[in-house]
Image (cartoon, rainbow, N blue to C red):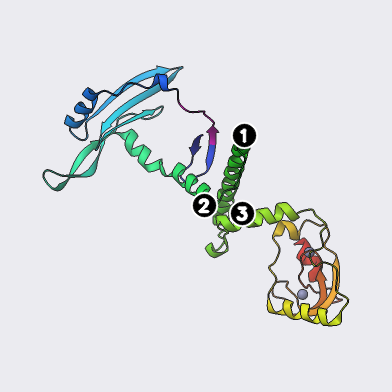
Amino acid sequence: MYVLCSVFGFAYKFEIYSGQDISTRPEATRQKRDDEKNTPRGTYEERTASYEGVDLACIAWKDNKIVTMLSSYVGTEPVSTVKRFDKKTRERIDILCPKSITEYNSHMGGVDLLDSFLGRYHIRVKSRKWYIRIFFHLFDLAVINSWIIYKNNAIKENVAKKNILNLGEFRNELAYVLCNSGTNENKRGRPSSSSLEQELQAKKKRLQSKPIPPLDIRMDGLGHWPDVGVSLRCKYPHCTGYTTISCAKCGINLCLNKNNNCFTRFHTT
Ligand SMILES: [Zn+2]
Ligand SMILES: [Zn+2]
């Protein structure tokens, strides 16, 4: 798949291809390899052409090997220099470098970055059907793109770095929200009738603090029924009250009395 990427790994455009046509590959000859060896570093050549109204520049530049590049918007000019180590003189020397090469080097990170994101987490599919694999690949691509947008927005809004989700956390939250948003599921299960069991459950609850559900679940307005159980500290930020009221879906205690309505505030703001 060809992907057009930003420096941050955001995929703008993609195209699926099915391997190159071998018959169009030029024959590599021995003559060419000898020429390559004798050409001094920094040598370059440029050919230009116009194809369907688009000016194209094809550049060949000798670094350690010959690098060829085709560009629709940049050619050799302005030529700059890059530092390279010269084996004969054993010192760093300046060699000429066409503009299209420096342009490429400053932007090439994007696709590599995207690939490293894809490599870190991806949906594993065993299917041998190519279109299933492409579907999940594109799904992963969409997740990465949305994470990059989320991250950029968070940075713009000055969210503290430690509060910005990394890709793994983002995927976890996304999965949780996609599975639970709009569902009417009771997370706590049926209350146990045995008083001993209830005490044990309460103890367990006191020991481990429940994670606060993501915003998309908290505000989805479905199945957030109040439950009455053991008295625990209210989880609403900065509220220090204790309450026996909890949300059946979120599984956390929230005040609901004549002075405080953390329950409604938690689910609406
Ligand atoms: Zn709730
Ligand atoms: Zn409260």
- Marks 3 and 2 in Cβ contact (< 8 Å): no
**Mark 2 / mark 1, whichever is N-terminal:** 2
Which element is circle 2 on?
helix
Q: Nearer the viewer, mark 2 or mark 1?
A: 1
Task: Report the Cα–Cα distance between label 1 and label 3.
Answer: 23 Å
The residue stretch that appears in magenta: 13-20
Q: Amino acid at mark 3?
A: Arg
Answer yes or no: disc 1 within 8 Å of ligand 1: no
Answer yes or no: disc 3 within 8 Å of ligand 1: no
**Mark 3 / mark 2, whichever is N-terminal:** 2
User: Does any portion of residue 25 appear in the rendered image?
Assistant: yes
Residue 169 lies in the magenta-colored region:
no
Task: Report the Cα–Cα distance between label 2 and label 1.
Answer: 22 Å
Q: Position of residue 183 (x, y in %)?
A: 80, 55
Q: Is residue 72 above or below residue 179?
A: above
Q: Amino acid at mark 2?
A: Arg
Q: Quadrant of ligand 2?
A: bottom right
Residue toward you, 250 or 175: 175
Mostly what secondary structure, the magenta segment? loop
**Residue annotated with mark 3:** 171
Q: Give the number of the disc on residue 120.
A: 2
**Residue annotated with mark 1:** 131
Q: Position of residue 96 (x, y in %)?
A: 23, 36
Image point 68% across, 68% down: which residue? 211
Side (left or right) of 243 relative to 72: right
**Mark 1 / mark 3, whichever is N-terminal:** 1
Which element is circle 1 on?
helix
Residue toward you, 133 or 248: 133
Q: Amino acid at mark 1?
A: Tyr
**Which picture quadrant has residue 140?**
top right
Which element is circle 3 on?
helix
